[in-house]
Amino acid sequence: GPCAMRRAQLKRAGLRFNRGLIERLQRSLTASKRCCVSCPPLDAPRRMVIEAAERQRLEQEHGCTGPALLGRLLTHFRVKDLAHPPISNFHVGAVALGASGNVYFGVNVEFPGHPLSATIHAEQFIMASAALRGESGLTHLVVNAPPCGHCRQLLNEMDGAARLGVHVVAADGSLSSTGHPQLLPQDFGPAHLSNDSGLLASEANHSLALPVQHKQLKELGDEALRAANRAYAPYSECPAGVALRLDDGQVFGGHYIESCAFNPSLPPLQVAVVNAMAHGALTSLHQVREIALVELARSKVSFARTTYIGNARFHLMHA
C-alpha cells in the first residue's frame, strides 16, 4: 500500500548523514583554513550551540563581536558542510546570536520520500533549537545564502523580529547586512491575527494530560506530552508534541511551532529531529526506532498522517 511504498522510498534514499553531526563540527576546524592569519584557531563547540560564557571568551580572545564573530564561526567551522540536502544538493549553514548571549548553529535537512514541505531550513533549525532551549529572542542571524521567503516569514513570528539583524556572507567573506523589516516589506505578522505575544516571547504550558491507557509508553509518552505542553500554537489552538526513541534508547522531544502564515509552521516531528541532531545523538534517521505523537482528539490540525520516519513504530496519543 502507500505506506509500504513510502517506507521503501525512505529506505532506498538511505537518509544517512555522511558523518555524525557533532563529530563533523568538532573535526571541521582542523580541515579548514584560518579565516585570519593573525587569529588562532577556534575550538569547535561540543553541540550545535555555544554558551554565552564561551562566546564572551572568544570575543575577548579574537577581538571581534556580534555579526563579525558569527561570520567567523560560520566560515571557520564550515557549518554548511553539516547540512543534509540529498534532494537539492544545496548546502545552507546559519548561525545566530540569542538575547541570552548563546550562539546557535543551523543547517538544512531534506527528507527523501516526504513532501518537500517537510524540509528543515537552516533558519528554521535555529528557531527550533532556540525555542527548545527557552531562548527569549534572536538579535543577529548570519547565513551563507539569502533567507528564502518561507524563512523570512517564520522569523517574523519571533517577538522582536523588527530588531533582528540579518547578514549574508559574500564570496569574499564579507557580510551584507540589513534589518529583517527590509527583507519583508509590508509584512503579515502575528498582530494581524490578534497575537501580541510572538514566538520566543514566553514559554507555553497547555496543561495537557494523557488518559490512563497510554501510561504503558512511560518515558516516550511523557516526553511527547511535555513537548505538546510547550507547543506554540496560538492560531489553531491545537498543541502537539513528538518524541523519538533512538536505537540506543535515547529519547528526544519536539513541539509544534506555528506561523501566522500557516505554511511556514514547523511540525513537531521536525522539531524533535532538530533536538536530536543538536545534541549530536542523531546521525542517521535509521536510528529512529519509535515515535510518539501527542495531539488533541478531533483537533482542527492533526499530524497523525505525516509523522513517520522509515519503519519506526508509531504511537498516536490523544490528550
Image (cartoon, grey):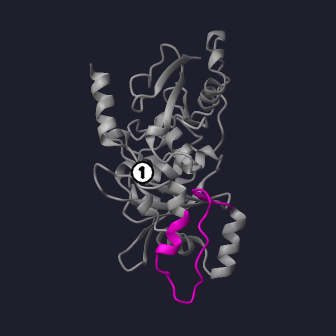
Image position, residue 162 (x, y; %): 52, 56
Depth check, front residue: 97 or 2 = 2
Q: Residue under circle 1?
A: 17
- Quadrant into which the N terminus falls: top left
* SS type, badge 1: loop
Image coordinates for residue 95, horizontal then vertical, percent? 51, 62
Q: Is residue 211 left or right of residue 127?
A: right
Residue 157 against residue 1 in the figure, above or below: below
Q: Kindly tell me whether residue 193 is visible in this rendering.
A: no
- From what the image shows, is residue 61 above or below residue 107? below
Q: Quadrant of residue 112?
A: top left
From the image, give the main secondary structure of the stretch colored magenta.
Answer: loop
Residue closer to the observer: 229 or 164: 229
Amino acid on which disc 1 is placed:
Phe
* Residue 82, visible in the rendered structure: yes
- Residue 205 appears left or right of 171: right
Write the start and end of the magenta stretch as one range: 26-51
What percent of the width, then of the height, locates residue 245? 56, 33
Q: 236 or 296: nearer the eye?
A: 296
Q: Residues within 10 Å of mark 1 (few under 14, many from 20)?
A: some
Q: Decide: is 118 above or below 50.
A: above
Image location of residue 157, percent across then percent down = 50, 45
Up-down: is 122 above or below 117? below
